[in-house]
Image: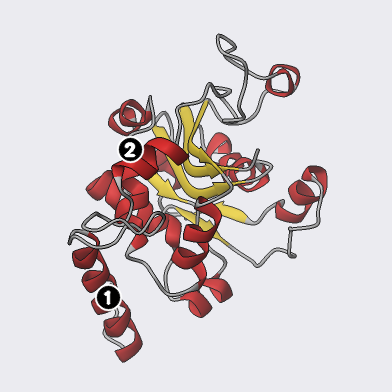
Amino acid sequence: MLDTRPAGIWRRGLATLAALGARLPSQCAVCHAWPAQRLCAACCARFAPRLARCATCACVVHGGVAQCGQCLLHPPPLDACLAAVDYGYPWSQLLAQFKFQDDPGWATALAALIRQTPGAQELLEQADWVLPVPLAPGRLRHRGYNQALLLARRLAGAHVRPDLLLRTREAEAQAQLTRAQRLRNLRGAFVLEPLRAQQLAGRRVLLVDDVMTTGATLHAAAAPLREAGVAHVGALVLARTP
């Protein structure tokens, strides 16, 4: 349903202007070269090297290794997981601008970086539905937009379904929690929209998020999809914490 409230109109207008601005020549946000896009090709090549990663958790592994030892011992609920970069300079600063400094225009450049990740295009083409990891309602109201949804829309357009996976509550701050504590913290935080859950049985679903730290959020989001009979659950993220 179209949001006709003044705040909703303002946010849509801001997102539209930001998307247009992302296509115009400007300074590279990293090296400040001019003219360039927000991320110039040289900085992408320097700070987003192609690394061998575990196929199901996106951690860096030695070349020729398909899965890390942790995923072999404890198979995750994700059939595939791809990350474009490691979380660090300059990506942590750029993501902070994207998420916390009212700059949704970053979605275009960052989605392009995700799309260039080996295997990402195949996951997008094979997915029946692309689901952004939802924000808790209070956080969404405070921020005004879900960065995962902005990324997903630029990656998959009409295949994006933000109405299928819902977040029911705010979780305790997780920065200082272990992975096991994060999993407990997020248990039951994600549910499927009851009237549409049956649409997912036997489908291929792709989750999209900005950052993967321990995998707890993506695994919690995958849980109701598995329960609904989804045949294949993949994930695309911009950054993976080393």
Give the label, 1 or 2, closer to the camera: 2
Q: Is residue 37 left or right of residue 93?
A: left
Quadrant assignment for the C terminus: top right
**Residue appearing at x 24%, y 78% in the figure:** 13
Q: Is residue 236 left or right of residue 217?
A: left
- The residue shown at (59%, 54%) is 190
- Does residue 68 sit above or below 187 in this rendering? above
Judging depth in this view, the residue of 72 and 60 nearest the camera is 60
Q: Is residue 242 above or below residue 40?
A: above
Lower sequence index among marks 1 and 2: 1
Locate residue 86: give its quadrant. Answer: top right
Q: Residue furthest top?
A: 64
Amino acid at dot 2: Arg
For the residues marked 1 and 2, what is the alpha-carbon distance in whole angstroms? 24 Å
Q: Quadrant of residue 159?
A: top left
In which quadrant is the N terminus drawn? bottom left
Residue at label 1? 12
Q: Return the residue nearer the eye: 74 or 102.
A: 102
Q: Identify the residue position indicated by label 2 in the image.
A: 115
The answer to whether residue 163 is seen in the rendering is no
- In percent of the image, x 32 and y 79: which residue is there? 11
Mark 1 residue type: Arg
Picture coordinates of residue 43 (x, y %)? 38, 44
- Residue 83 locus on image (x, y percent): 49, 36
Q: Secondary structure at mark 2?
A: helix
Instruction: Residue at 74% x, 58% y: name it.
Output: 175
- Asked if residue 10 lies left or right of residue 25, the reply is right
Q: Let me know if residue 130 appears in the view.
A: yes
How far across and how far down the image is residue 104, in percent?
36, 67
